Amino acid sequence: MKFKQFTLDPFQEAAVESIDNQNSVVVSAATGTGKTLIADYAIDKLLKKGRRVIYTAPIKALSNQKYRDFKEEYGEENIGLVTGDVTINPKGNVLIMTTEIYRNMLLAKDTIIDFVDYVIFDEIHFINDIERGIIWEESIIFSPNRIRFLCLSATIPNAEEFAEWIESIKEHKVDVVRYEKRAVPLKHHVYDTIMGVTDIEKVIQTENYPDYDHFFKSKKKKRRQKKAQVNLPQHYNLIKDIQKNLPAIFFVFSRKETEKKAEEASKKFNFLTDKERREISELANELISPEYRSLESIIKLKAVLNKGIAFHHAGVLPRAKELVEVLFAKGMIKILYATETFAVGINMPAKSVCFSSVYKYDGINFRNLFTKEYFQMAGRAGRRGIDDHGDVYIMLDRNRDDFRKIKQLQTKDIEPILSQFRLTYNTVINMMGNYDEEMRNWILAHNFYTYQRKKEKASANIKNAFNNKVRNLEKLGFIEENKLTTKGLFARRIYDQEILVTELFTGEFYKELTDEQMVVLCAAIIYEFDRRNEFDMDSMKNESRDLIKKIGQYDDTLFKYLTKLHVKKMYKLFSSFAKEDEFKDILNYTNLAEGDLIRLFRRTIDLMRQIRNATEDIDLEDKCSQCIRSIQKTPIKVEF
């Protein structure tokens, strides 16, 4: 079967047959096998029938990228984008959004959902994510039964269990399509100062493996006695050895290190001609406006780009990331140092993938990569139709890396997806407002968590958690006689710190705040503490003290939910930008990377939008709009 200019593989044919039969389908396939083509088929088919489809992406940047791609493919009039930052053409037949936005629409009973027939969940294995997995699960639970799903994922060992759960709660057929063979096979290698680049199978088959094991153990013993100086492998030496296998994506689990390594490599390699450098310069000037070209990060990026080298991470300016992605797609970047976010959804394969380590900090602990994480990144090696195989290289630290664990990591993706279901106050409030008791009990008993844990005990635990939250909401005045009060109705539309935000903005307190204070307060609410972050807290001590005093006089119990230190940290940054400072000026008030700073401002705007949508107070609506306008300036404002 052919679709567009492509001949479909058997697994792609099986998936489109399920779509044609109006079934839901879970596609579990290795990275780089062509899952996106199945989504394209579904969109093309539904557009021709005049039906509406929602495409959800795990991250906002991917939503924006898909909007640009789909607009070019299917025409601007057919494509809409709905994110916390912007709403474009919400009547379009293809709506692109983050999974969070889709879930929020479901809980808010948004009328857009009434006209949706199909939802595509890209990267559905994110349901396994400890922090955000609940969003995917709730999106499935609260979707109307008439909606069909296309769930695209990297390999899921328990895909059948997942599909059976969806089938059991949605009462329609859910097919599973598996494809574990890559279109471009991978060859796995290790690299260290003793063996150099070595095929991992050869290491095991020869005497090197016992020697390595002995070396590892002896070094470990010595390290316990005294810290030994270890000759660690260097990334630029690996690049030197694999130059015939470029371009390569070099995954590094530290933003700072991606930039440092790119700088180091740029001093040792030059992969470009003068003509290519001129082309890069022209494109850089086209994408990055003059006021940002003097930023240190942009100067640093352009310097390494001139050598055919780049870095990419979440802290980079959005337009700078776009520049890197465009140049990488053009083949003008030979070595790209990137964090793992580059492997999420962005379909940009290379001939090779390198790992600076298989050890990462996940926000809680340092740990080895999970197999799914490894294959998500390693799967970027090998370009379909260009390379007969993709090469993957792991740099080894013999003092720390356990060779056997590395070998196990590379064999197969064996980790099942597990439910991360938990009840938030927003979910409980919406369940109380949207469903009767019988339906609430059904939902509590039929989530993926209870399905995986064979129901009774798990269901009872969730029911108890639900009842406890209901009792707390009754004490706070969000629920009376099992119905939502004014507070409860407001809190339905607040998706972050819902208790604190509702207590602050359902009364008259906001009238005591200046616009500047309102912006700072919203920023302080959503700011997430990180000990590495630094802010100017000295120059506006009196102003921040006054705001904290106002909040305390209104209700000092709110400081159970709001950290006073966050108010102090946010004051100079947000008040200055809201008044007269430009973005490049406020970089002097914090050590936050540009991309992180933009995200902080956009999340603050998103919270004020939620408040505006939740309230029936026209004055509060107007105040929110004015505050949003004060900080929605370039580059905070999304541009397409």
Image (cartoon, rainbow, N blue to C red):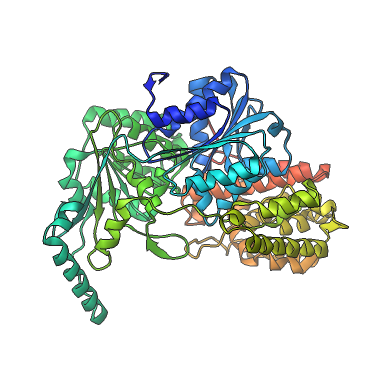
Q: Position of residue 12 (x, y in %)?
A: 42, 29
Residue shown at 54% from the left, 43% from the top: 163
Q: Residue furthest right?
A: 481
Residue shown at 44% from the left, 65% from the top: 365
In the drawing, does residue 541 fall left or right of residue 158?
right
Q: Position of residue 25 (x, y in %)?
A: 52, 35
Q: Position of residue 464 (x, y in %)?
A: 71, 64
In the drawing, does residue 135 fall left or right of residue 306?
right
Residue 579 visible within the image: no
- Where 264 falls versus 320 (above or below)? below
Q: Position of residue 205 (x, y in %)?
A: 14, 56
Which corner quadrant holds the N terminus? top left
In this figure, what is the number of numbered marks? 0
Q: Which of these two is toward me, 222 or 610?
A: 222
Q: Residue furthest left?
A: 207
- Where 157 falls versus 283 (above or below)? below
